[in-house]
Amino acid sequence: MRTLDKTYNPHGLEDRIYRTWEEKKYFHAEVDHSRKPFTIVIPPPNITGILHMGHAFDNTMQDILIRFKRMQGYNALWQPGTDHASISTEVRIIQELQKEGIKKEDLGREAFLERAWEWKKEYGGAIISQLKKLGSSCDWDRERFTMDEGCNRAVTEVFLKMHAKGYIYRGSRIINWCPVCNTSISDAEVEYEEQNGHLWHIRYPVIEADGSVSKERFVEFATTRPETMLGDTAVAVHPDDDRYRDLVGKEVFLPFVERRIPVVADSYVDMEFGTGVVKITPGHDPNDFEVGRRHGLQEINIMNDDATINENGAKFAGMDRYAARKQIVKELDEMGLLVRIEDYTHNVGTHERCHTTVEPLIKKQWFVRMDELIRPAADAVRNGTIRLIPQRLNAMYFNWTDNIRDWCISRQLWWGHRIPAYYCDNCGEVQVAEKAPEKCPHCKGTHFTQDPDTLDTWFSSALWPFETLGWPDKTEDLDYFFPTDVLVTGYDIIFFWVIRMIFSSYEQMGTYPFHTVLFHGLIRDEQGRKFSKSLGNGIDPLEVIEKYGADALRLTIITGNSPGNDMRFYFERVENSRNFANKIWNASRFILMNLPEDGKKPLFLDTRLPRGLTDADCWILARFNNTVREVTDNMERYELGIAVGKVYDFIWDEFCDWYIEMVKPRLREENAAEDASRQAALWTLETVLVGAMKLLHPFMPFVTEEIYQTFLDGFGSEERSEFAESVMISSWPVFREDFVFAKEEEKIGLIKEAVRGIRNLRSEMNVAPSKKTKVFVVSENAQKREVFSDSLVFFETLSHAQGTLLQADKTGVPEDAASVVLADVTICIPLDELVDRQAEIARLTREKERLEKELSRSKGMLANERFLSKAPAEKIEEEKEKQKKYEQTYAQICERLEALS
RNA sequence: GGGGUCUUAGCUCAGCUGGGAGAGCACCUGCCUUACAAGCAGGGGGUCGUUGGUUCAAGUCCAAUAGGCCCCACCA
């Protein structure tokens, strides 16, 4: 006989089920033109990473969508893979080497890369096995890596094409330099930190008309970085600033390096700030760089790559930038050029990885020109070709596209895609090509050196949606699965990744990579803080899975969350999810207990409605039907949190707490004689439970699979079908016309109200559970017998449960009785059975007041001409019905009150 | 400085296109009822940040305001 343990235990079960899925190749998708594809590419996790809550969030959402679409009959492909993550991996390897006392440079490029590949081999797979623990139904046969052979070819191809089109160029620009990582970093990798510093007020002597350095006339300005004065090539004032009008065009004297630099007028200067004078250091400040370019100023680099002062820094050469700062301030003071020092807090750019203060430097780097490329990316969102969910993120998206700057793609790192550019050893001429050319077209030299830099890690990620499907080859996969459908990711990488995928895809493929981007927020700790290593507040999803199961983790993550919103993670919430798994487990056990033991074909395999269905059966079928429609609708609108909430409520509240309780009497041995009714109940129980397992499967894949298969008991079909052998390849429930039972729904709705009324009464009147109470059900409705044909049984159940005899009676409400007045039925408990007459009066009075409020609202609406003329007819009808009910009920309550007092 | 977002029950949060205030946890009461105490039944508790406006009707739309958070830019 099919049995389940008393308590749900995900341990072991989840791994076992996942293995079966893999063995059966359910995750695998092949080109099949008879079916529509549905494709998601995974945001490739870094090979350095271990699974964190962010991954869990991201991948749970993707898995839900892909499982849903798979069940709906789509040829669903979830394309997995990992990212080489150039800088973060390189940093980690350097740290590892440090422990062995080895420096990256000592090892050399070749040996270092060997080391990196070893790292990839060792740790790259860890994240994959962790994703499997979560239940991710990726097509692992298609796993890719951003530095595998195909992706390498894709990267080179794109680089060459874009270079040929003039989108990629090499140029001198001011870039952010990290002196510790020894590489340039992109603007987006700079993190601003508020730091306490100083504002040094300094003055430069003016050069007099006779060419002498003035002893009396000075220009005063303030700076947070005095050491950069060594690279000053001008001071600037605002063109409208009357105070300095006569100075513009003159020169001032720069101490130490003894340079004469011009005073220029530029509207970049804020007249209000400080003295209205700014020193201009084009070599070490992005704004100054711009000013410098406008005025044709000299660009002087005063620093080495390790942020020590170089030979342009006169006597300070060789000093660290901070040591030089100290010394310069001291000497300026001695020269009488330091006016004062002020405390000042300001934002300082730091490298997000190592938090070193970045140094703006002018360097030759490779760039992608963005002005033209970005346009179609902005248009796609603007005209709705690509939909961002939630829509409010459009603003953030346009904030990026409207303020785009050229993308610096070269990195002075070793781990990554090598730039396909070769310099002639003889003349230095650069050739961009797949391989080193044989001859330099410029000087005919034959020896070349490849550019030592690698590409920004996002360069390859930007190609991810099509390179993983075979590009640059023309593959059938690409043709069939691309463009993909939905991208699921965090809003924090809109710029890094999403925008870059969109323009890259448009440029290379002529089409957008997906039509929808579903964003999720961040998972925070219970105090609302981000998870971070330094805070030590991280929660390891694997530990949660170990303790509560992957299903519980998934349900927790998705419940009550709406797209793009952050959420807090509480263990209490996981416990609740685990309890829900246990709940459905036990509901299943209950049904199994009542099934025949002979291993007969399960009843629900016959989808026709059986004889003997009662009102209760029809009601739950109708409620299920309704849930199917709503949940499907929510899923299609990506409202996953709402969808799962509805499934949860249906299963726990309607199915378990009401239907199973209603149906119990019919299952009892002594009622076995009424076989048709019993069979109908069992058929309904099975049909609804199995259907509910399907609805729940995308969210909680493991427990639903176990239950589904237990019920199918080996009778499943090997094909994808309604009763496939696995729930994950079974078909998603659809709305059924034969499950529409409006009348029965209404009846049971009434009965539920009645029962609640009785429970309320008993509870409020302090009726002891053991106390037997008479209950009269009074109805004006002549059809009451029919209405309550089920309810009698139901009441009996309750009475049994409560240890109380309840009985229905058609006589009127006795004088001395507490009662609940419903629309067309009154439920009462004789007062002699009860404690307190006053309590009943108080209760009825409250009820009366509530109704008065409702009535006045309703009357107001129906008296309003505009409402009557504008509102849809159904709405008005509905309101009239409501009012009628209110009035009836109100009258009854008044009567009861009178009778009591 | 620009943009976004949030403010709903003690806590954490749902609430789609305006029309009877919700969930989980916590709390209180009563139940070990033969699926489940990881459970069942019932209950208390909210002027939906503040002010004004649109509307017959606003948690829901508009404006202003206070406070929190996020992103971008970054004033030397």
Image (cartoon, helix red, strand yellow):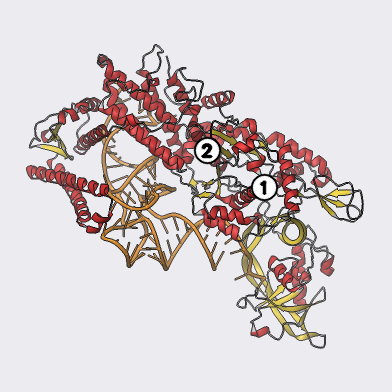
**Type of amino acid at the residue the image marks with label 2:** Thr
Do residues under tags 1 and 2 come within 8 Å of each other at their CB atoms? Answer: no
View extreme (bottom): residue: A210
Tell me residue A760's x, y (percent): 22, 37
Comparing A888 with A486, the one in front is A486
- Find residue A338 and report its image quarter: bottom right
Provide the chain ID for the residue under circle 1: A
Residue A640 as seen in the image, left or right of residue A169: left
Dot 1, crowdedness within 10 Å: few (<14), some or many (≥20)?
some
**Type of amino acid at the residue the image marks with label 1:** Gln
- Find residue A236 and report its image quarter: bottom right
Query: In the rendered view, would you say A382 is above or below A844?
Result: below
Which residue matches tag 1? Answer: A508
Dot 2, crowdedness within 10 Å: few (<14), some or many (≥20)?
many
Provide the chain ID for the residue under circle 2: A
Q: Nearer the viewer, mark 1 or mark 2?
A: 1
Which residue matches tag 2? Answer: A60
Tell me residue A242's x, y (percent): 64, 85
Query: In the rendered view, would you say A895 is above or below B35?
Result: below
Residue B22 as seen in the image, left or right of residue A771: right
Q: Which quarter of the figure is the N terminus of chain A placed in?
A: top left
Q: CA distance from mark 1 to mark 2?
A: 30 Å
Mark 2, secondary structure of its residue: helix
Residue A27 as seen in the image, left or right of residue A604: right
Tell me residue A734's x, y (percent): 40, 32
Sequence-earlier tag: 1 or 2 = 2
Mark 1, secondary structure of its residue: helix
Query: In the rendered view, would you say A731 is above or below A359?
Result: above
| Picture mark count | 2
